[in-house]
Amino acid sequence: MNFLISDEATNPLRVAIIGAGPAGFYSADQLFKEFADRVQVD
C-alpha cells in the first residue's frame, strides 16, 4: 500500500473504516503498521 501524505505534522491521516469483517480489520491493521505515529482510525 502506498499513500501520498502532504504536511504530515499538521494533517494527520484520518480514516473511517466501514464494516467489521476481515477486510476492515486487516485494513486497519495495515494502516497502523504503516502510519502508527500519525493515523487516526474511526
Image: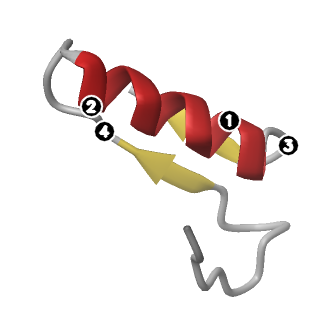
Residue shown at the point (66%, 57%) measured from the top left: 12
Q: Amino acid at mark 4?
A: Ala
Residue shown at the point (16%, 31%) measured from the top left: 18
Residue 5, image quadrant: bottom right
Residue hosting label 1:
32
Q: Position of residue 22 (x, y in %)?
A: 27, 19
- From the viewer's perspective, is the residue at label 2 or at label 4 nearer? 2
Residue 3, image quadrant: bottom right
In the image, farthest residue toward the left: 19
Residue hosting label 4:
16
The first of marks 4 and 1 along the sequence is: 4
Q: Amino acid at mark 1?
A: Phe
Residue shown at the point (76%, 82%) measured from the top left: 7
Q: Secondary structure at mark 1?
A: helix
Contact (CB < 8 A) between labels 2 and 4?
no
The first of marks 1 and 3 along the sequence is: 1
Residue 27 to residue 9: above or below: above
Residue shown at the point (42%, 38%) measured from the top left: 27
Residue hosting label 3:
37
State left or right for residue 34 relative to residue 30.
Answer: right
Q: Amino acid at mark 2?
A: Ala
The first of marks 2 and 4 along the sequence is: 4
Q: CA distance from mark 2 to mark 1?
A: 14 Å
Give 41 or 33, whichever is nearer the viewer.
Answer: 33
